[in-house]
């Protein structure tokens, strides 16, 4: 499978929990996550995000985040990554769930993005 | 006519069917859901069985309510509040005085519709409940009616529940809640036949 | 403070994590949560939701959830609760964060709901 | 003109100011944010200090890059990628050959704008960087320019960052990132004065 998902949240539990939720409906999709700062405080870590990119088995990634400052760290990580990463300004939990369901069903990126469009809220 | 006794028997048979088809129901839930419908229902029906164990002398309303509470508290998935509401509405209708099967099932279906906001054609358990209720009202419920209703969900596009995220890709799969509802009504037929 | 927040998720970590995130910006708002089934599997529990309602120090609650089946259990719990509970079909993390920020700033319900409206996605 | 040496001194003074005002910065971040700006910046500047400890013989580009990396990896909040990008852009500009302060600061501000998508008037650190850059370009940066810029954020309505969730309710509060940026430029003035 060449499309994977990366979940980025300010809180380690949210990132891990969203991953748990969506793995249930997407057993064959590679899903990695980055939650919290390097010392697991509330915040985000560019290094953790880069690791989540690297650890993902897919080479093209869909990335979802919670708050604006996570987006900034995501963008820095994207600039430093060799992978093609698509970043969505959509509802974190709901859009990650939508993407996971669709990728598991073998839906292509264009069709996934069409389903994500109405979830854009930031 | 439903009585406390035949309702207990009904749920007992339903529980057996769920237990026997647990893996199949979860498999049906895998391509268009999260793969837990069989486990959810089995957990719920085990709780129903336990809760009904000491209800031999209870009245019909109490039996319905006991079933509802067990399902609501133990199923965990969407089917919990849906089946739970169905039995809760039957408890209310029976408390209001009726033991009439069509009346009770109509109350149950109305409850499911209210709880989930789905309607016939949305590829949910409602697509089994609706034709079954019509047949019960007409006095001609058969296994074929049930099977056809279950099968009718296959070509449908899901509009509610987890399968709805897949849109058109849900076509070609039976709805797991429709299948478990099929077992419910097969169990009812068996009870009615006696 | 008479307006509180309740977070409901299929996954215990998501419910707890969102609470952690929003408590940061709403130290004086009562926030309770219900995550997972009674035995902490993925799913929701009407009993846990009822407990989250009861344990909340506020008597008027704003409730946020992740997926549709959580909404059904929420509605059942609402029918059984004495408290006035407002249920929003909005992006879980983002709308809970918005509500928390505003309630902490003393904003009234009407104004909070106006800010939540564009986050409706389900 | 910036050199490796005066840049190290600059950041050292900035770190001292952050350390001294850590609680104040977090207090400013409490009513319109999550109350961590002082802690975030202090964590970042401690890392900067440690990373610069063995950079006495490094060139200006290396010094900028070292600062950027420490801030990016240790701050944790929005201010991390923002200040980090500012220093990363100064590293790039210095690598391209410039040591000219106005040119370097212009590159830094452009980086902050690109990273955060905010513009002047949005009640962010940009509302300090913008007038300070203009003053540096005009050769007349003073403490009064800095103080006025910081103060100017008080009546603004936040359009970016956590404070933007509060909309009009953010009025009447200084922006914490503007205040920390004020310390950065006060430290610069002290270095330039020597
Ligand atoms: N809104 C709804 N209205 C009616 N039935 C629904 C609705 N949502 C889901 N269902 C039924 O519930 C079944 C899924 O139950 P289950 O797998 O136990 O729950 P979950 O989807 O939460 O994991 C579906 O197959 C469908 O029949
Ligand atoms: N998009 C943005 N553009 C420019 N500056 C921003 C932006 N978002 C936040 N800031 C600045 O960052 C400061 C907050 O930093 P900090 O508290 O460390 O991060 P966080 O908000 O993630 O907790 C704000 O006071 C503001 O000056
Ligand atoms: Mg399921
Ligand atoms: Mg489930
Ligand atoms: Mg902050
Ligand atoms: Mg923060």
Image (cartoon, coloured by chain):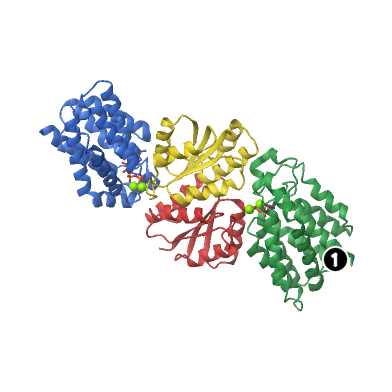
Chain colours: A yellow, B green, C red, D blue
Work out whether residue B23 or residue D112 is closer to the camera in this orientation and state it: B23
Q: Please identify the quadrant where the N terminus of chain D is shown.
A: top left
Residue furthest left as drawn? D194
Residue furthest top as drawn? D97
Q: Position of residue C67 (x, y in %)?
A: 58, 50
Work out whether residue D124 or residue B56 is closer to the camera in this orientation and state it: B56
What residue appears at the point 76 percent right and 52 percent down from the top-left corner?
B179
Question: Is residue D150 left or right of B145 when viewed as pictured?
Answer: left
Looking at the rendered structure, the number of numbered marks drawn on it comes to: 1
Question: Is residue B181 left or right of D33 when viewed as pictured?
Answer: right
What residue appears at the point 67 percent right and 67 percent down from the top-left corner?
B70
What residue appears at the point 75 percent right and 62 percent down from the top-left corner?
B107
Q: Secondary structure at mark 1?
A: helix
Q: Residues within 10 Å of mark 1 (few under 14, many from 20)?
A: some
Location of residue A67 (image quadrant): top left
Judge whether residue B101 can be spotted in this image: yes
Location of residue A113 (image quadrant): top right
Residue furthest bottom as drawn? B57
Location of residue D47 (image quadrant): top left
Judge whether residue B82 can be spotted in this image: no
Q: Position of residue B169 (x, y in %)?
A: 69, 38
Q: What's the chain of the residue with tag 1? A: B
Q: Which residue is mark 1?
A: B191
Q: Position of residue A52 (x, y in %)?
A: 47, 40
Figure check: B115 above or below B34: below
């Amino acid at each position: 499978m060449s499309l994977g998902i990366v979940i980025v949240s300010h809180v380690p539990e949210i990132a891990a929990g969203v991953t748990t939720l969506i793995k249930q409906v997407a057993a064959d999709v590679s899903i990695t996550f980055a939650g919290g700062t390097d010392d697991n405080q509330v915040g985000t870590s560019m290094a953790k995000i880069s690791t989540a990119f690297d650890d993902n088995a897919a080479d093209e990634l869909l990335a979802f985040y919670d708050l604006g400052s996570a987006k900034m760290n995501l963008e820095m990580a994207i600039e430093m990554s060799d992978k093609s990463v698509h970043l969505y300004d959509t509802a974190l939990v709901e859009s990650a769930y939508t993407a996971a369901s669709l990728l598991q069903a073998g839906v292509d990126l264009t069709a996934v993005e069409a389903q994500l469009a109405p979830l854009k809220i930031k | 006519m439903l009585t406390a006794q035949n309702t207990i028997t009904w749920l007992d048979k339903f529980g057996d069917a769920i237990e026997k088809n647990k893996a199949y129901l979860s498999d049906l839930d895998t391509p268009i859901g999260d793969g837990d419908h069989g486990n959810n229902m089995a957990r719920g029906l085990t709780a129903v069985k336990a809760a009904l164990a000491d209800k031999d002398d209870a009245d019909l309303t109490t039996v319905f309510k006991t079933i509802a509470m067990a399902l609501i508290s133990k199923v965990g998935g969407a089917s919990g509040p849906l089946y739970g509401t169905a039995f809760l509405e039957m408890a209310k209708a029976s408390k209001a005085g009726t033991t009439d099967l069509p009346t009770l099932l109509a109350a149950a279906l109305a409850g499911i519709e209210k709880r989930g906001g789905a309607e016939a054609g949305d590829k949910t358990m409602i697509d089994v409940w609706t034709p079954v209720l019509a047949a019960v009202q007409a006095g001609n419920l058969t296994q074929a009616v049930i099977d056809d209703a279950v099968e009718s969900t296959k070509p449908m596009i899901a509009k509610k529940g987890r399968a709805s995220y897949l849109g058109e890709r849900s076509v070609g799969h039976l709805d797991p809640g429709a299948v478990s509802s099929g077992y419910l009504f097969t169990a009812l037929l068996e009870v009615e036949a006696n």
